[in-house]
Amino acid sequence: MLCIIPGSVSSKMFVRAFNHHKTMLYSFYLLIICIVLYFFISLGAYHVDAKQKKIPAGAVLTNLNHDIYKRKSPLENEPPEAQWMQIADDQQPIKAADDKQPIKAHQGRVNMHVFEDCCGGSLDQLKNNLLYPLFPNVRTTVSRLAVSPQWSNYGLRIFGYLHPSETGEFIFAVSSDDNSEFWLSVNENPENLQLLAYVGSEWTAPGEYWKFASQISKPILLVKDMKYFFEVILKQNAGIDHLEIAWSLNHDNAIFSVITSEFLSLYEDESSLRMGDIDHIPQTKASYDRLLEPIPLSPHPLGENIGEDPRDHIYKYKILDESYLKDVFPECHYKPSYILAEPIGRYEGVYLIHFSSVYPNDYTRQTRGVDDEMCFYSKDPSFQADKGLAAYMTEVEDSDVQKINTGEGPFWQRVYDVKPLNAASKQTTVVANSCRTSGNIVMSQDHAMRIVRAFLEALRSREETRDYSLLRVVNVVRREDQGVGSRYLMELELVGPHGQKVLVSRYVYALAEESSKQMFLCSPKAFNWNPSATVHIIVAVKDQARWIIQFIREMEKVYRATGDKNLNVIIIDYNSSDIDIEARLKKAKLPSYKFKRMEGNFQRSGGLQAGIDLVEDEHSILFLCDLHLYYPVNIINSIRKHCIEGKMVYAPVVLRLDCGASPRAPFGLWEVAGYGLMGIYKSDMDRIGGMNTREFKDKWGGEDWELLDRVLSNGLEVERLHLRNFFHHFHSKRGMWVNNNPG
């Protein structure tokens, strides 16, 4: 037995050890208590935070068809307290520029980063900025995807999550001034972004979603109870600034509407972060730090008018045999009220011509001339000259932003409602003639699809075509006879019962209908186009060797692409001294040609008439043209289907290129006053008397208008359309043929 004597060394060591053991035991108990308290405090904080600010675990429970069109921005589940966003080094709060008040951070908003002092209107200029995308001047939020800060030389990056309220196919659209892009991920992961829509090298009016093909996305399937990361980029230079992202369900009569707060949520709450905190900022395909990487070329083409369109290669389609369409449509009498029955005054015909409209949009509108663009918009009945394009936007109240109107921007957090603006569908012949960038009048989708449905119903009424279904609307052309009816050229790609693809290309007529009545189509009597008619391209020349060679190369290009054997080239040469045209033609890869040498001074009318006289088949088509042209490869098909023997001639409008422009980067003005390029059947040309070689023997200029007068006076109608990829090259007058009467 061990005995410890009080006061001894052993007793002191025992007491010291016992006290140390007690201290460790108390510390252990205290640690356990702290851990338990921390657990309960954290759990309570998480519960409160989730209650106040959590994103729903699915779509917002709302009816898209109803709520997507709301004008207000209801902000649900917002926290009771305002939270401050921090800025840079001095930790001062960022405030909205137009209200100078703290900003609330909550769901129903998305992140917006602002990059100021960034010049130019190109997105490349923004993306190549060394501060982009990690170091914005301002980090804030907005409650809907429609903004107009009323500032200049800046870029915006808006990102967050999109919450669809139902499962279905959605179509997105973007409108902006200047350039913009809309990217959407296939899920909530920013790494899976895809570019859906953009405004490339130019700009649009507010809500104008149909100016460029690139503005509207293909249908995208979105699933309820999922969230999708998205990103929007805007670059603004000067002038009116705006950005709208809209969506609609993929239905025939769906209407685009701006995406509002009930479908949005933040990617990151930045209210407590310093501007130097950048690790949370997503780097994506759309926006990433390019400091150490080469700069790629812009993915956007210079113009939509050089983009692909099914009409450009329509000659490749196999046409459905005419026997399948026999008796599908009842025959009807066709004599439009605008057909003349008596002669008209000299040069009066140009004022009687009306343009036809097309569907889908063929993007023949030229968009690079700012002054002429405003001419285009100002013809819209709703345009307000004193407000300009800003009149198309209506500011929407945001309850989180206490606005103080200072009278000048920037207003980073102001949001807007913007109604869809389909300016092309509001066009008229007056606009087309007065605004030389306007391009073709575009038929509304609603009207075009009514005709398409009526056409398909007629096909299904016959056993031979009952099993054919619509694959694509390639082309619809409408010539309206006001208050009487309309003629349509219907070109639809169909798929047959065995998977074979064919093209229906046929004229039909419809009386002016009441909207409540079913559309009735008939076949206009003796109004059919001949897909095998020979087309003679006729040109008169003198001493223009390089342009003559280029013309022959253009004809070779058309023949090489189409393989069309019913193409004939006719050149009338006024004794050129700088080229042996006949020798050049013999080497050319053309199906056929004719050549005639003339003596004396150059005569356009006389030369064209000499070419006309070489054509023996009166049931073939003449195309009277000029030398300095770039032809689309579908030119022969286009001439054939718009020329109807005894009924109609074709006068396509050519785009006159500006100096420095080219077919690869075309910009210029449509030559709406010129009628020198005309397709007409030989029999019709003979009937109206041919070219006026008596009055225009030693001069040219006005012979096209005089010919147009006689075309109209003889009861022929004129199909007038802007033709895609049909250009008149810029050239000087030096070395040109002498006009003895230039006046």
Image (cartoon, rainbow, N blue to C red):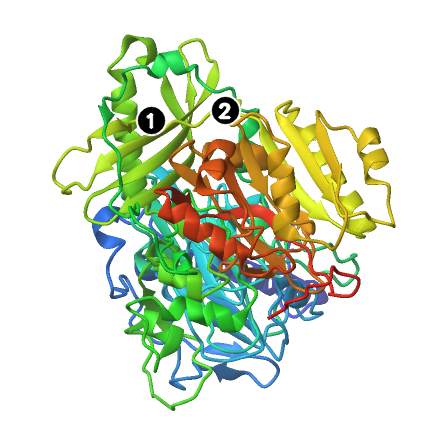
Q: Is residue 76 above or below residue 458?
A: below
Helix, strand or loop under label 2: loop
Residue 164 visible from this viewpoint: no
Tag 2 residue: 531
Q: In the rendering, at what x and y percent does residue 27 appear?
A: 54, 62
Seen in the image, is 498 located left or right of residue 554? left
Q: Tell me which numbered mark, 2 or 1, is placed earlier along the sequence.
A: 1
Q: Quadrant of the C terminus?
A: bottom right
Seen in the image, is 336 located left or right of residue 371? left
Helix, strand or loop under label 1: loop
Residue at (12%, 36%) from the top-left corner? 517
Q: How many marks?
A: 2
Q: In the rendering, at what x and y percent does residue 731 appear?
A: 72, 61
652 or 248: nearer the eye? 652
Q: Amino acid at mark 2?
A: Pro
Q: Is residue 109 above or below residue 151?
A: above
